[in-house]
Amino acid sequence: MFVGSNPTLSATRVMAVYHQVIERLRRVLPAAAVLSSPEELKPYECDALTLYRQLPLAVTLPADEAQVIAVLRICHEAKIPIIARGAGTGLSGGATPRSDAVLLSLARLNRIIGIDPLARTARVQPGVRNLAISEAAAPHDLYYAPDPSSQIACTIGGNVAENSGGVHCLKYGLTVHNVLALRVVTIEGEVLEIGSAAPDAPGYDLLALLTGSEGLLGVVTEVTVRLIPKPECARVVLAVFDSLTRAGQAVADVIAAGIIPAGLEMMDRPTIAAVEPFVNAGYPLDAEAILLCESDGTPEAVEEEIVRMEAVMRGAGATACRVSCDEAERLRFWAGRKAAFPAMGALSPDYYCMDGSIPRKRLAAVLQEIRRMEARYGLRCANVFHAGDGNLHPLILFDSNIADEVARAEAFGAEILELCVREGGSITGEHGVGVEKIDQMCVQFGGDELETFHAVKRAFDALGLLNPGKAVPTLHRCAELGRLHVHAGKVPHPQLPRF
Amino acid sequence: MTDLGSLQERVRAAASARRPLLIRAGGSKDFYGGPLKGELLDVSAVSGITHCEPTELVISAQAGTRLADIERVLASFAQMLACEPPQFDGWATIGGAVASGLSGPRRAYCGALRDFVLGIEMIDGRGGLLRFGGRVIKNVAGFDVSRLMTGSLGTLGVLTEITLKTVPRPRAECTLRFEMDQPKALESMARWAARPLPLSATAWHEGALHVRLSGADAAVSSACGALGGEIMAGADAYWESVREQQLPFFAAARELWRISLPPHSPPLPVVGPTLIEWGGSLRWLPGPQDGSDLQALAARIGGHASLYRAFSKPSGSPFQPLSPAMLAVHKRLKAAFDPQGILNPGRLYPDL
Ligand SMILES: Cc1cc2nc3c(=O)[nH]c(=O)nc-3n(C[C@H](O)[C@H](O)[C@H](O)COP(=O)(O)OP(=O)(O)OC[C@H]3O[C@@H](n4cnc5c(N)ncnc54)[C@H](O)[C@@H]3O)c2cc1C
């Protein structure tokens, strides 16, 4: 039990413990690395899911692994929760603070330790920005493939914690496919060396378990990633459709034709309308949807593949296809996709970015269903997403100054996620569960599976101090929501404590 | 199709009596891992493809389904399992392949078997039937238990169904052969891998390096031109014999060590024949060898060594020992999934 929620401690006693902990943190870290005044804490009150805000108890800014260990040991001993934070670009509230928890920023562990061009690996500290890895590898004609749209800001530690993806993940994989090894500090302050640059590290695949674990199992202090050779050339087909159904079909057809594009992204009509004035990419404003389908490789292979891609698009009913003829045009075609999020700001005071995944063949049906929901909730929704992966990003537009719009936006989002689960998909493709989707976890998983997640959590963090209340709901919470899958009238493992 | 309920019942009974179970399907990997202990839990009848959708690039099959049957179905719509897991005379099942985590020649260039696991259904050590992951490519809800199962050798659960991502078959393929010594071959593999070439497999033994290129016609033919070497006839049969370990090198070895190293590692200071795969990251050495020396040597260059196949199974673990901190986590995870320690005890490490 945390200090802050222990009923046997008086409020004064709790404050005294907090005070002592901050004092002890100041003894192991430089003065500027422990923040505790409200003005200093303010910039950390939320991540990119700004609907949830809370000042943390304190913020620590360690500069190396030894300082990370010291912070964890102090908090563990005092039973104070710890929340790791990278750049705070997370969209599901994974790094949302708590008033009874210390926020552990990894931003100052931002050194690239080494790049080995012939082994094609980079060893970096967790606070290194995603794009900085590719920039450092560029002189060797190598790059780090997973490229979240937030790559200029987000950290590799955050990417590991969320198993982040990007436009190129259809062909080159997600974070889990591109990370080779981790150094992880446990809540007790012990260092685990997980995975290795050598294939098939012995023992359980803790590398996979830690990837996407949202800071619940340990703090990542070093990451070794795989680098891949830069393709010689890339070209993109811009295909225009007059119906969502036909665009969705084209996505399935590309895959069925045995093509794995380097990227396959969809934008719907509202998105096109929002971005075109921004970037003048030449998108047709009367299209229901456009697809951007990229091929990369040697010039000959790209030439061959582009011809096949275009044929599939036309076969699926594209009303027009344009192929980028040079790098400038390719970047212009992509500019709209990249500007989609900022462009929404011009359409609406606020937007809420959802992240569900579904089987590709259900794309059109789900998009139509979202259209119907727009009417029901009285809110607009724009769709711009990783179509090739079946990973939707509905952007629900709302105005937080209008009384119930936040609540309606949240309800709309929740219904989309539940639709994804019904269609055989998932409530999150790449943004994580965090605080945002914790209730939908009760829809996607049964009680036995949730209980297994808690058991895994306890194997790493018996006291539940790392990022509590995120990612995995308590069975109690699910039961209260009336959403626990109760098998044969029995709550799973009734003998186990519920926390 | 066997009824899962009766398998669950067996596990529950074994748990309450604390009787170890030996999980087995095709038995093709009895040689692999630590000692075989416990009462047989045969899952070979839990078999059949349960879901297969070419446009989604996924296939689901019950654990006892033969890999050969899965590959046959995938081939009928020009797809395949990307990492080419060995089929061991046709006996290997998808459950056994995932439990052992063994990948084939394509692994260094396309990913390991674990990279393609999307979801699993399993029975834990309490007899509960659990489902993790799913049938979609992207899914980050909850901890990645599906991949955790890969390579855990049945010590965390009885796999009953598996969903894998599949890949399209390459349109063109060509294998080049180069006469070269080991240092030159290691250097060449590292240099080529750092260039955007459509590599899909490499193997060096007896003074010859074999390099397979796969992909679009134009990509393969231009890469062949760029690399030189002589085009190998009968390449499909050759790669199958590498995957299935049927080359004379393997047949001659009574004992076999598997050494896994970071890319671009130097030749190992050992005498005798060696066979190298995966761009230099996988080295096979025939035994007998001094195991702890070999493991210490591998660890010094950032890798690890295991006794892959022995004339008689050692009593301990054939795998590189874990650090005390890692072993402690492993034991707690084992207890979380299998509190009575009844599932394949000792198959991975004596304590698990
Ligand atoms: C405009 C925009 C576009 C985006 N586009 C994409 C996209 O295309 N694809 C995608 O996948 N995501 C995208 N994201 C989401 C976000 O950028 C990613 O989730 C990213 O990986 C978060 O990294 P971060 O450093 O900001 O982590 P934070 O937000 O600081 O933290 C995220 C989680 O990681 C944990 N964490 C952070 N560092 C560590 C560590 N060292 N050890 C342990 N746990 C840690 C935190 O506790 C938290 O749970 C986007 C976000 C924005 C704002």
Image (cartoon, helix red, strand yellow):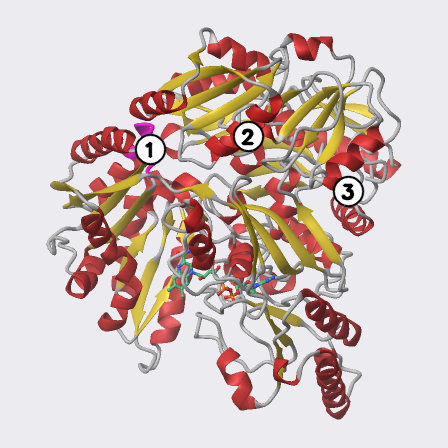
Judge from the rendering whether residue A407 lies leftward or rightward of residue A375; answer left or right.
right
Circle 2: element type: helix
Q: Which mark is residue B187?
A: 2
Which of discs 3 and 2 lies nearer the camera? The answer is 2
Q: Residue at x 74, y 39 (%)?
A: B299
Q: Residue at x 22, y 70 (%)?
A: A347
Which of discs 1 and 3 lies nearer the camera? The answer is 1
Instruction: Calculate the distance from the C-alpha at mark 1 to the C-alpha at mark 2.
Output: 36 Å
Q: Nearer the viewer, residue A140 or A101?
A: A140
**Which quadrant, please, contains the C terminus of chain A?**
bottom right
| Residue under numbered circle 1 | A255
Q: Nearer the viewer, residue B30 or A171?
A: A171
Judge from the rendering whether residue A411 lies leftward or rightward of residue A472; answer left or right.
left
**Which quadrant, please, contains the N terminus of chain A?**
bottom right
Q: Which mark is residue B338?
A: 3
Counting residues from the start of the chain, the first of labels 3 and 2 encountered is 2
